[in-house]
Image: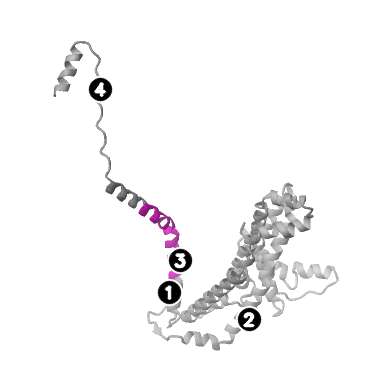
Amino acid sequence: MSSSIDRRRMRGRGAPVVPARPARPARATPRGQASQRAGHRRWEGMLPYLLILPALGFMLAFIYWPLLDSAYLSTLDWNLISPVRTFVGGQNYAVLWADPDFHQALGVTALYLLALVPVQVILPLALALLLWPVRRARAQGAYRAVLFTPTVVPFAAAAGVWFWIFDPTQGVLNQALAAWGGRGADWLGSPTLAPWCVVAVAAWQTLGFNLLLYLAALEAVPPQYVEAAALDGAGAWAALRHVRLPLITPTIFFVLVTTVIFVNDDVFGAINILTDSGPFGHTINLLYYLYRQGFRFLQTGQASAVAVLITVAVMALTWLQFRFVEGRVHYG
């Protein structure tokens, strides 16, 4: 009170007014500071889990829950329509093991796996190494577009072209063979040739994506490593073998793992449209067998049992690759 009266008196006398100092904020006690730091640490610990929560929810809703539901449905006798579901335990698995079509699908799937893994892993790598020297040329963009186009073209639209190629009477392939003095064949009607036609179509469709992965990996190789190898007297082949290829092994390993995982999906379109699992089931794979049992014959329990077996087999093959192949991968 007295300070305000003194300021009014000084103002009346013409003296300058000195503003009052703002009150200092109260300092936090050591206990309060400790609680603030603890809350900050808790928030930092929860932040990563909050960031992955949307992806985790997506995986739970569209991957793990359907997998668990398939495992449950594999123990039932259900036709997908009737409200009555009968628990049969492992009977569906016993029925599958006694079905010769299941064994045929298993063998054809193994054929696709053994044929497509080298083709989808090695062939795009070889093409990428051929395109890499002309990476600064304008033509490489055209090469990439031509090779990547099959990946983005729906197979339902491309199937007509493949029917035209494999047609036994007016097909382009038989006409080309006849022009060179060769003999045509019934490509999609032959039990021996039809599976390899499916392999060729699946390789054509997946070639471009793996090619771009390899080109990106080669682009990411630090040039100073190659220059250091050249200074040590390494030629082009030695630099490729000892510098470039070891540094792109993570990409090679990724392509290998994803090829094994998706080999059933890669051939499904060709089987469904070109052969319909024929002739005489010689092109059927496990995924198409699942589709046929579940949506044509309405054997939901057997189809779910096939889904469980495919999942277990893919997990086992993936574990084997990480166990015995990943040790050869150079990460940086």
Identify the main secondary structure in magenta. Answer: helix
Nearer the N terminus, badge 1 or badge 4? 4
The residue that appears at 24% across and 25% down in the rendered structure is 20
- Pointer 2 or 1: first along the chain: 1
Whether residue 268 is visible: no
Where does label 3 land, which residue?
62
- Residue 18: x percent and y percent? 25, 20
Q: Earlier in the sequence, mark 3 or mark 2?
A: 3
Q: Helix, strand, or loop for circle 3?
A: helix
**Residue 69, disc:** 1
* Location of residue 312 in the rendering, given as x and y in whole percent from the top left corner: 52, 76
Residue drawn 86% across the image and 71% down it: 181
How far from the left and from the top, in percent, is residue 112?
65, 74
Q: Three-letter amino acid code at disc 1?
A: Asp
Q: Is residue 44 magenta?
A: yes
Q: Quadrant of residue 120?
A: bottom right
Task: State the separation of the CA atoms marked 1 and 4.
Answer: 74 Å
Q: Local crowd at mark 2 within 10 Å, few (<14), some, or many (≥20)?
A: some
